[in-house]
Image (cartoon, rainbow, N blue to C red):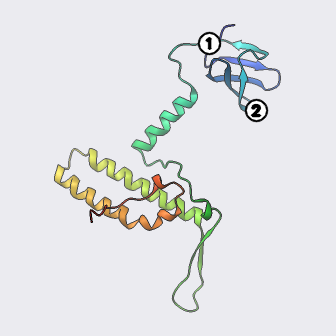
């Protein structure tokens, strides 16, 4: 039996028309028009509409998507997926004024968390642009980096919202 390559089009009796997006030695990952992504065994019963020969250096759609996401996160202000700690999911942030007679302001904590993540990501982009700048000398880059580190330090209060410790803000580490 000949293995079909990525991009081959098939017609499956149960799932309908689809395109093979990934291949292993015994499974095809097929994106079907009506059913979405499904895995089927290579020896399943289906009709080949258009066969693409498998090549050694074929890249799956998942690999292409992962590479694109990585590039966008590195070179733009596109935010990565960051999880909020489970205990805060569905919660609200309540701002209570100190002045009598004023009403509270209530904000969904997910909205607030998303804004904190956007601030963090934009600071990271600014940091990358400073470090790659051709117009700043090394001392200016160091000075600006110290300000950024202090900004991260000021934002450590919000670390309680993050599910993963690797997503936390980190400021200056004290050597004391």
Q: Position of residue 95 (x, y in %)?
A: 55, 78
Q: Residue at x 58, y 13 (%)?
A: 54
Q: Which SS class for mark 1?
A: loop
Question: In this view of the protein, can residue 137 be seen by the observer?
Answer: no
Q: Nearer the viewer, residue 70 or 18?
A: 70
Q: Quadrant location of the N terminus? A: top right
Instruction: State whether residue 138 is above or below residue 26.
Output: below
Tag 1 residue:
52
Q: Nearer the viewer, residue 130 or 163?
A: 163
CA gap between label 2 and label 1 equals 22 Å
- Judged left or right of residue 170, residue 17 is right
Q: On the image, which quarter does residue 147 sit in? A: bottom left
Tag 2 residue:
35
Q: Nearer the viewer, residue 129 or 171?
A: 171
Q: Quadrant location of the C terminus? A: bottom left
- Judged left or right of residue 162, residue 136 is left
Question: In this view of the protein, can residue 81 be seen by the observer?
Answer: yes
Q: Residue furthest right?
A: 13
Q: Residue at x 53, y 29 (%)?
A: 63
- Judged left or right of residue 156, residue 49 is right
Q: Earlier in the sequence, mark 2 or mark 1?
A: 2
Image mark for residue 25? none
Q: Which SS class for mark 2?
A: loop
Q: On the image, which quarter does residue 76 sit in? A: top left
Q: Residue at x 73, y 29 (%)?
A: 33
Q: Residue furthest front?
A: 176
Label 1: few (<14), some (14–19) or many (≥20) C-alpha neighbours in 10 Å: some
Q: Residue furthest top?
A: 1
Q: Position of residue 146 (x, y in %)?
A: 26, 59
Label 2: few (<14), some (14–19) or many (≥20) C-alpha neighbours in 10 Å: few
């Amino acid at each position: 039996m000949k293995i079909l390559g990525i991009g081959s089009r098939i017609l499956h009796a149960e799932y309908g028309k689809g395109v093979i997006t990934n291949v292993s030695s015994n499974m095809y990952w097929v994106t079907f028009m009506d059913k979405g992504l499904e895995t089927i065994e290579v020896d399943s019963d289906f009709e080949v509409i258009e066969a693409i020969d498998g090549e050694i250096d074929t890249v799956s759609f998942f690999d292409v998507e992962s590479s694109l996401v990585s590039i966008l996160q590195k070179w733009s202000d596109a935010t990565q997926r960051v999880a909020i700690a489970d205990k805060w999911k569905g919660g609200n942030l309540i701002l209570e004024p100190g002045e009598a007679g004023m009403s509270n302001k209530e904000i969904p904590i997910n909205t607030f968390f998303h804004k904190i993540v956007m601030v963090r990501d934009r600071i990271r982009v600014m940091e990358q642009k400073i470090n790659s700048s051709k117009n700043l000398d090394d001392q200016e880059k160091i000075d600006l980096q110290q300000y950024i580190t202090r900004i991260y330090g000021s934002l450590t209060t919000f670390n309680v919202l993050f599910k993963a410790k690797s997503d936390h803000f980190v400021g200056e580490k004290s050597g004391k």
